[in-house]
Image (cartoon, rainbow, N blue to C red):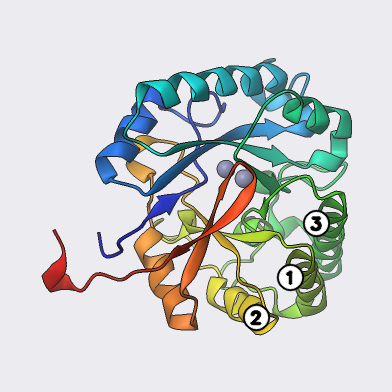
């Protein structure tokens, strides 16, 4: 690998309904890659805590419990892997008792805050930009940033996941995905993250996907740096073994180019800065 310390702090095992490989297989693959840190962050879609139409009647309540037990088992099993215990809390404010219940009595290292679904809507994944007028799309993005600000106000998580998530699905064909029209909303979120000592995630999953729009991560992280931000967590959002740490080198190249010298790993809910150390070709093992 081109970097001394690569960590992947956003990963799903088969405890998440949309992932394929079990936690032991994910850990074995992460260990083989020689990652500095590896955090498994199975889904807890809070709005669907007690059942989900997408999810064959299963409950996220049970998935979270199952994932946590497996995290403890795999920490014991993989003594040479720095495996950290994480959770991806989806739209916590849409069912606050569920979010609180998921966190209660469990000692996580790292909590990711995500917004996959606006209140009262379906997952952005299922939305088709062709069915909205430009005004309706503007309204969706306005609500997106508002709901993220409310989540940050609540604050019981460490990093804000994949900020460009709605751009993945709400970009018209041929259009460059960008938050340029919504700079005020984006700035408000970035400023709040910095003021509250939280982190923003570099979600690298779209860097390796063919035919997916290249998301405007450079613009966002450049702006984050301008505003004084220093805490960026790295996550490939792998849902199968072969995607672990995918796109990570490209992402670190980009951060280095912008001028960042460190990224952030959360252990026991506390941020630790890890150096971005590039290894020249001739010195790689
Ligand atoms: Zn997510
Ligand atoms: Zn995820």
The CA span between labels 2 and 1 is: 8 Å
User: Which quarter of the picture shows residue 87?
Assistant: top right
Label 3 Cα crowd, 10 Å radius (few <14 / some 14-19 / many 20+): many
User: Which residue is rendered at x = 68% and y = 32% of the image?
Assistant: 44
Q: Going by the image, does 7 lie left or right of 203?
A: left
Task: Give the total of numbered labels.
Answer: 3
Secondary structure of the residue carrying tag 3 is: helix
x then y, percent, for residue 112: 65, 46
- 100 above or below 2? above
Q: Are marks 2 and 1 in contact (CB under 8 Å)?
A: yes
Q: Going by the image, does 249 lie left or right of 48?
A: left
Residue nearest the viewer, comparing 183 with 61: 61
Q: Going by the image, does 6 lie left or right of 54?
A: left
* In this rendering, the label closer to the viewer, 3 or 1: 1
Q: Which mark is residue 190?
A: 1
Q: Is mark 2 within 8 Å of ligand 1?
A: no
x then y, percent, for residue 127: 70, 49
Q: Are marks 3 and 2 in contact (CB under 8 Å)?
A: no
Q: Is mark 3 within 8 Å of ligand 1?
A: no
Residue wearing tag 2: 223
- The reply to whether residue 171 is in sight is yes
Q: Which mark is residue 148?
A: 3
| Quarter of the figure that contains the C terminus | bottom left
């Amino acid at each position: 690998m081109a970097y001394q310390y690569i960590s992947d702090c956003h990963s799903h095992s088969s405890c998440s309904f949309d992932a394929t490989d079990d936690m032991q297989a994910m850990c074995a693959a992460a260990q083989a890659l020689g990652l500095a840190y590896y955090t498994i962050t199975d889904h807890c879609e809070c709005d669907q805590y007690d059942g989900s139409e997408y999810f064959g009647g299963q409950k996220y309540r049970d998935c979270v419990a199952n994932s946590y037990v497996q995290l403890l088992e795999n920490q014991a099993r993989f003594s040479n892997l720095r495996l950290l215990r994480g959770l991806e809390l989806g739209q916590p404010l849409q069912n606050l008792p569920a979010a609180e219940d998921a966190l209660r009595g469990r000692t996580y290292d790292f909590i990711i805050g995500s917004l996959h679904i606006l209140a009262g809507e379906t997952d952005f994944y299922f939305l088709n930009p062709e069915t909205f007028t430009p005004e309706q799309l503007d309204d969706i993005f306005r609500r997106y940033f508002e709901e993220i600000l409310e989540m940050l106000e609540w604050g019981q998580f460490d990093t804000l996941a994949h900020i460009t998530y709605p751009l993945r699905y709400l970009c018209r064909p041929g259009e460059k995905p960008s938050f340029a029209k919504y700079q005020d909303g984006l700035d408000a979120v970035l400023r709040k993250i910095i003021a509250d000592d939280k982190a923003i995630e570099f979600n690298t999953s779209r860097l390796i996907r063919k035919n997916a729009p290249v998301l405007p991560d450079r613009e966002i992280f450049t702006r984050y740096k301008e505003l004084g931000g220093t805490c960026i967590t790295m996550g490939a959002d792998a849902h199968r073994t072969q995607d672990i740490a995918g796109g990570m080198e490209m992402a670190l190249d980009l951060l280095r180019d912008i001028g960042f010298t460190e990224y952030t790993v959360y252990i026991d809910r506390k941020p630790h800065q890890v150096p971005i150390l590039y290894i020249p070709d001739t010195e790689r093992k």
